[in-house]
Image (tube, rainbow, N blue to C red):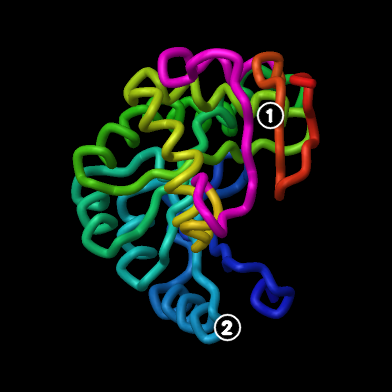
């Protein structure tokens, strides 16, 4: 259905989820044949496959069948990271979602089982970034935040800074992100022929990622596709 609707990627679930009430994180979902079929059909339409996966087994099952990006991947281990590097697969990490859910659990009705799973992936989140860095896996920037939680999106920069340098994180949000959506040279860079998606930062974010916080308070200008959506410079 996703293929027919025209999405550039097809998402499949190959492990349990945090917010879903009945599936353990280590549950295996989709057979190998089903994963391979999803990959084949996506490729037939010129698209790629991404997989919701937390555990090493789920990651290996997905990447082994040709899945291109792993969403989450908090519980990844060295072996599955090495497989991803070998296959040229990407990890799209989104640590902030788990912190936001934990902080607002009561507001969103998260039960004890969900919170237990949430704590597991929080514990693994920063470790997953370190493992992928050692293995040479490219990690993109994601948030997995919806609705009212979207105000926390830029906190992802600060969370990753516990194990990564500011420039590494900025590249994950720009250059690597462009690779994930197959738009290198058009997104995530300043170059002839690229979309003019630009921001002006009041300060040096390579030294202070806090400049991306406070809902754009330190970003006086935002341009998308050559059009100003915010311009406090004039």
In terms of image quadrants, where is residue 207? top left
In terms of image quadrants, where is residue 169? top left
**Foreground: 62 or 165?**
165
**Residue 69's spot in the image, x, y percent?**
44, 58
**Residue 3's spot in the image, x, y percent?**
65, 77
Q: Is residue 167 left or right of residue 3?
A: left
Quadrant location of the C terminus in the rendered image: top right
**Foreground: 32 or 79?**
79
Residue at the spot x=28%, y=57% of the render? 84
Q: Is the residue marked by circle 2 packed among few (<14), some (14-19), or many (20+) residues within 10 Å?
A: few
Q: Is residue 139 left or right of residue 132?
A: right
Magenta residue span: 188-214
**Residue 146's spot in the image, x, y percent?**
72, 38
Magenta segment's dominant SS is loop
Q: Which mark is residue 110?
A: 1
The Cα–Cα distance between marks 2 and 1, rounded to whole angstroms, is 38 Å
Q: Is residue 174 above or below residue 231?
A: below
Residue at the spot x=53%, y=27% of the render? 156
Q: Which mark is residue 129?
A: none
Residue 196: in magenta span: yes
**Residue that protrudes farthest toward the bottom in the picture:** 44
Residue at the disc numbered 2: 45
């Amino acid at each position: 259905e996703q293929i027919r609707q025209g999405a550039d990627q097809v998402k499949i679930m190959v492990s349990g989820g945090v917010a879903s009430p009945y599936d353990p994180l280590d549950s295996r979902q989709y057979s190998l044949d089903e994963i391979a079929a999803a990959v084949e059909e996506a490729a037939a339409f010129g698209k790629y496959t991404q997989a919701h996966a937390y555990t090493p087994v789920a990651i290996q099952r997905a990447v082994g069948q040709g899945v291109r990006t792993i969403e989450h991947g908090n519980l990844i281990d060295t072996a599955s990271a090495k497989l991803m590097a070998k296959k040229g697969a990407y990890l799209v990490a989104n640590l902030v979602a788990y912190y936001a859910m934990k902080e607002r659990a009561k507001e969103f009705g998260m039960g004890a089982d969900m919170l237990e799973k949430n704590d597991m992936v929080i514990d693994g989140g920063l470790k997953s970034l370190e493992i992928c860095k050692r293995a040479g896996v490219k990690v993109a920037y994601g948030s997995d935040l919806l609705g009212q939680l979207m105000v926390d999106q830029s906190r992802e920069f600060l969370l990753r800074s516990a194990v990564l340098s500011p420039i590494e994180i900025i590249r994950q949000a720009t250059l690597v992100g462009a690779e994930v959506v197959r738009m290198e040279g058009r997104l995530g860079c300043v170059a002839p022929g690229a979309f003019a998606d630009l921001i002006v930062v009041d300060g040096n974010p390579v030294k202070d990622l806090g400049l991306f916080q406070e809902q754009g308070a330190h970003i006086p200008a935002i341009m998308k596709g050559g059009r100003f959506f915010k311009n406090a410079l004039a």
